[in-house]
Image: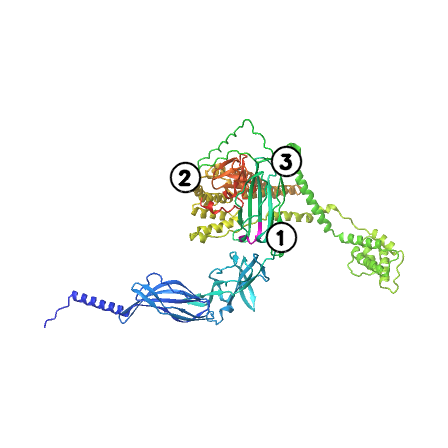
Amino acid sequence: MELRASSPFTWLRLLQIAALLLLGAALASGQSVRWQPDRGALGFGQTTELQLIFEDCSPDGTPSLPAVPGLSIELAGQSQSWETINFSMTRRVILTYMARATQKGTLRIPSFETKTDKGTVRVRQAEFQVGEATVGQSGASLDSIVQSRLNLPDTDVWAGEVFPLSYTLSIARRFSAQLASNVEWSSTPLAAEDWAKPEMADVMVGGENRTVVTYRARAMSKEAGRVPLKQAQQLVNLQTGTSTFGLFARPTMEQFTITSQPVTLNVKPLPVPAPALFSGAVGEFTLSSKVVPVQATVGEPITWTLELAGVGNWPEITALPSRQVSKDFRVVQPQAKRTTKEGMLFEGTLSEDVVLIATKPGTYTLGPVRWSYFDPKAGEYRTLVTDTYTVTIAAAAPPPATSVAPSPVAPGGSATPGTLLNPSAQPPPSPALPRPIPRDPLPGESRGWEPLTGGALLSAAGSSVAALAVFWFGLALQRARKQDPARPRREARDRLLHVLVQSTSGPTPAQLKVTLESFRKESVVLLASTHLTPSAAQIQAQAAKASADGATWSVLWSEAERALFGSDAALPSDWRQRAEAAVRTFPLRPFNPLSSFRLRHLAPFLVWVVVCSWCFTSANAADATATYRSGKFVEAETTWRERVTTAPTDWIARHNLALALGQQDRWGEAAAHATAAYVQQPRDPSVRWHLELSLQRAGFTPGELVPFLSGNPVYRIAPLLSPTHWTLVLVGAAWCFVTAVCLQLYRSFHPGTTLLRTLALLLMTLSIVAGTLGFASLYLYRSLADPRAAVVWQTSVLRSIPTEAVANQKSSPLPAGSIGVIDKDFLGWRRLAFSNGQTGWVHAKDLVPLWRAPVRPPAAAKKK
């Protein structure tokens, strides 16, 4: 028999057959989907991991789980595994869910069908028993570790009353708890504000340290009766142990759902009957009325403003009370403007500007306006009454025969081309100043004086120094009198004379005892005796030491002691006269006013001046960098805008707000805030870079900034410091100069001190240089250094009067990038004054103040 070697083709066929057999064995095992575990115990409020295992199949999309009352299930992740036993391979796809039971008892996840890549597979039912949750291996119940509750007022509230509401979470500190979520609470049927930021406090309860987290809000119930409130829930992570990995250990955390106990609110109905003017408002309110102007001519507009403000059920307040106006007025009534504080539902204002245009001359009465509301604190209805205004309308003046149109204002000087991001790029054009329009009339009369010259000017300036010297001397004189060592003895002599003069020739025993005791007490002080109860000999020695008649004082002292403590309380009839004469002739050194000039009396004022000169304040910036970097530009903008509102001189917040606005393509407002950041911190390179980018994208450059950005050599020193810091340099220069003068003055009294002369010259030179630079830099900043300066961030209109209701008023276009000074405000309007003397009214929302808090732009304006 002949044996032949097996060919490669034969071995390949064998391998294919084996693979087919293995595949067939795997398919023979079938597909299945099951819960693991599918039964057991769950802790109430405790987060437990459940797995949905797909064997030999994969889910077709995310499985749709059946709803189970009292059980929340959330998908946490997905993984895969392979297992081979006896040539049988099993592939598993594992979906991990986090299950949390919110009610006790038996919970069942019913059987359901789910789609897989191998078809539809049915999942068997899972059943769990829900009991009290325990924390880790401690065996302690969750309720003993963490408690939460909703806190209501101690007394019943009125329907519509705004009342404080708080939620507290108390956690044992030994479990190193972490808040895993915000408070989840449905306020229905109440109207409630959002929870404020949590307040943390550490307390001792039953000998155990606990952390108490408190959330506060305000709420209101429109309906009366017993109102059951929904329970609040919050996720909390508790440390239940530690796990080790090599040399390192890390805490083991478990998540629990904390549910507050149910509470019921008692709401009282409002008293009946209610006033006829009552429209449902409950709270504390003020109603104000304003008429501008009260004297006008026919055809001129009169603005009657009515404003309601306070704390109350603002969701139920829809309109202001109606007003009665004569038919001789043409009425232009815009929509009422409602303003509420950010995050505040029950605190705001409702204002309405009614424009009245008189058609006939005469005298008219506007008001009063009455409005009723319920005061929950007083438990009664109240009625607010506004002031009454008398308006005088004069006949209109005849129109002039000819009129001369005002000549247009020449545009501002052209800016020198400068360097922005691209050295070859030209800066955007600076806006021209607005065309002239009529300005406000000046009220009253004025009487002026000629300018002071020569000696009069010198005397007026020097009077401030003289006033400071007189004030300083007064303080030193007061201190010298207070610290005079002879003052107690002089005061004792005055009190002793008063007692002796007030005593009568025939006093009662009680009056005599008081007189003699006062004599002994005050004589010890007057004679400066070191003994509380001296003898007659010691009195004589002290009197002789003070150059007084020692024998007389010794006799007076002995007679007083015999009268007080002897068996015979008789006192010589002339004792009072002799005592009064001895006191009056007692030699005492009078107060010397020249002692006020001693250094110990002048020094406290010097120390106070030095301390006050070094006082300063600072502010810390809020950090929203993480939100910004995660791409949530709107949330970052909100955070930084709140910071700018509370701390408008925080240049970092201004810069970051400009970044967030630029990310939303709102380059006009971004450029305005970038300008504010640059003015407040011109040395920071990031601030300057983003300012140039924002101006390029916005398409304008404020004229005051052009020299700073163009590389003009004259403007190289001023940007080293902000206007605020330059003012501090001026203050420091003044103090250096005064110190140098004082050193020179001291040297004139103590010649030979060459070191002081050198130091005085250095300080004087430093003060002159610093003062010159400070004045020059503030001059170059011009209006940018004015705390009232503001930049127009979007094209607007400059108006003669603060209203849009009068169409025939004079107005002028106001380009974006214009900078002016806010010198007046009226409701939502600001009056700008420009460098050419022009003034006019602009919407506050179109402005970004450089140093003060801006007005939040409305939603419509944000998209521009």
Q: Earlier in the sequence, mark 1 or mark 3?
A: 1
Q: Is residue 777 visible?
A: no
On residue 423, the disc is: 2
Q: How has the structure been colored for display?
A: rainbow
The amino acid on which the numbered mark 1 sits, given as a three-letter code, is: Arg
On the rendered image, what quadrant is the C terminus found in? top left
Residue 568: image quadrant is bottom right
Q: Determine whether the residue tagged by mark 1 lies in a helix, strand or loop.
A: strand
What segment carries the magenta color?
A: 309-315
- Label 1 belongs to which residue? 382
Specify few, some or many for label 2: CA neighbours under 10 Å numbering under 14, 14-19, or 20 or more. few
Specify few, some or many for label 3: CA neighbours under 10 Å numbering under 14, 14-19, or 20 or more. few
Q: Earlier in the sequence, mark 2 or mark 3?
A: 2
The amino acid on which the numbered mark 3 sits, given as a three-letter code, is: Gly
Mark in the foreground, 2 or 3: 3
* Location of residue 174 with respect to 771 vertically, above or below: below
* Location of residue 633 with respect to 421 vertically, above or below: below
Residue 162: image quadrant is bottom right
On residue 188, the disc is: none
On residue 444, the disc is: 3
On the rendered image, what quadrant is the N terminus found in? bottom left
Q: CA distance from mark 1 to mark 3?
A: 39 Å
